[in-house]
Image (tube, rainbow, N blue to C red):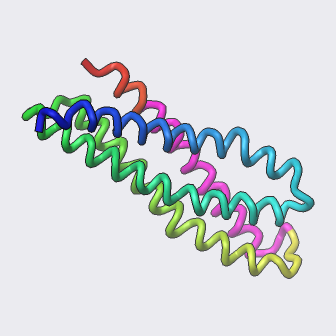
C-alpha cells in the first residue's frame, strides 16, 4: 500500500487543480467572454449552461478521485491527522454542492429557461425564480472555488 502513496498524492493534487482551476476559468474567463460576445443573453446562457453541464462531469470525477486518493493515503499512513480529516470534509462538501448544483439547480434553470423563451418580463414569476436559482448556482460555484483554493493550500502546506 505504501508504494501507492506518491501516486495517490499526485492524483489528488491533479484533481484539486483541475476542478478548482476549471471552475475559476469558467467563472472569470469563459462566462464573461461568452456573455460579452454572444448575439443575445439567451444564447449566451444556453452556451454557458451546456459548458457548465459538461464540466459538472469533470467535477464529479475529480471529487471522487480526491476522496479515493485521500483514502489510499490515509490507509497507507495508518493514521489520519486533523488536517487530512478537514481536507476530506472540504472535498466531500465540494462534491455534495456540485451534485446539488448539477443535478438539481441546473435542471430547474434549464426548464425555466424554456418557459422564459416565450418572452417573460422582468416581473414575471418564472423570471424571478430563474434569477433566484441563477444567484444560488453562482454563489455555490464561487464557494466551491474558495473551498478548492483552501484544499490546494492545505495540500501544499501538509507536513
- Left-right relation of 129 to 105: right
Q: Nearer the viewer, residue 132 or 98?
A: 98
Looking at the rendering, the stretch of residues picked out in magenta corresponds to 122-150
Q: Nearer the viewer, residue 8 or 36?
A: 8
| Up-down relation of residue 71 to residue 136 (above or below) | above
Q: Residue furthest left?
A: 78
Q: Position of residue 156 (x, y in %)?
A: 37, 22
- Left-right relation of 5 to 113: left
Instruction: Give the image quarter of residue 3.
Output: top left
Residue drawn 77% across and 70% down?
A: 127
Residue drawn 69% across and 39% down?
A: 28
Give the position of the N terminus as an image quadrant. Answer: top left
Q: Position of residue 42 (x, y in %)?
A: 83, 66
Instruction: Give the image quarter of residue 136.
Output: bottom right
Residue drawn 81% across and 74% down?
A: 124
Task: Answer whether residue 135 is magenta in the image.
Answer: yes
- Left-right relation of 119 to 68: right
Q: Nearer the viewer, residue 2 or 130?
A: 2
Give the position of the C terminus as an image quadrant. Answer: top left
Residue drawn 24% across and 33% down?
A: 84
Q: Position of residue 41 (x, y in %)?
A: 85, 60
| Up-down relation of residue 130 to residue 158 (above or below) | below
- Main SS of the magenta part reads helix
Amino acid at each position: 500500500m505504501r508504494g501507492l502513496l506518491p501516486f495517490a498524492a499526485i492524483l489528488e493534487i491533479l484533481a484539486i487543480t483541475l476542478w478548482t482551476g476549471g471552475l475559476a476559468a469558467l467563472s472569470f474567463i469563459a462566462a464573461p467572454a461568452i456573455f460579452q460576445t454572444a448575439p443575445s443573453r439567451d444564447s449566451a446562457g444556453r452556451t454557458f449552461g451546456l459548458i457548465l453541464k459538461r464540466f459538472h462531469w469533470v467535477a464529479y470525477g475529480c471529487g471522487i478521485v480526491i476522496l479515493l486518493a485521500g483514502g489510499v493515503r490515509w490507509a497507507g499512513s495508518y493514521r489520519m491527522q486533523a488536517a487530512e480529516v478537514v481536507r476530506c470534509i472540504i472535498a466531500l462538501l465540494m462534491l455534495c454542492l456540485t451534485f446539488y448544483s448539477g443535478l438539481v439547480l441546473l435542471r430547474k434553470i434549464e426548464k425555466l429557461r424554456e418557459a422564459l423563451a416565450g418572452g417573460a418580463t422582468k416581473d414575471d414569476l418564472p423570471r424571478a425564480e430563474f434569477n433566484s436559482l441563477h444567484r444560488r448556482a453562482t454563489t455555490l460555484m464561487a464557494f466551491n472555488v474558495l473551498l478548492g483554493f483552501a484544499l490546494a493550500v492545505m495540500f501544499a502546506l501538509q507536513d
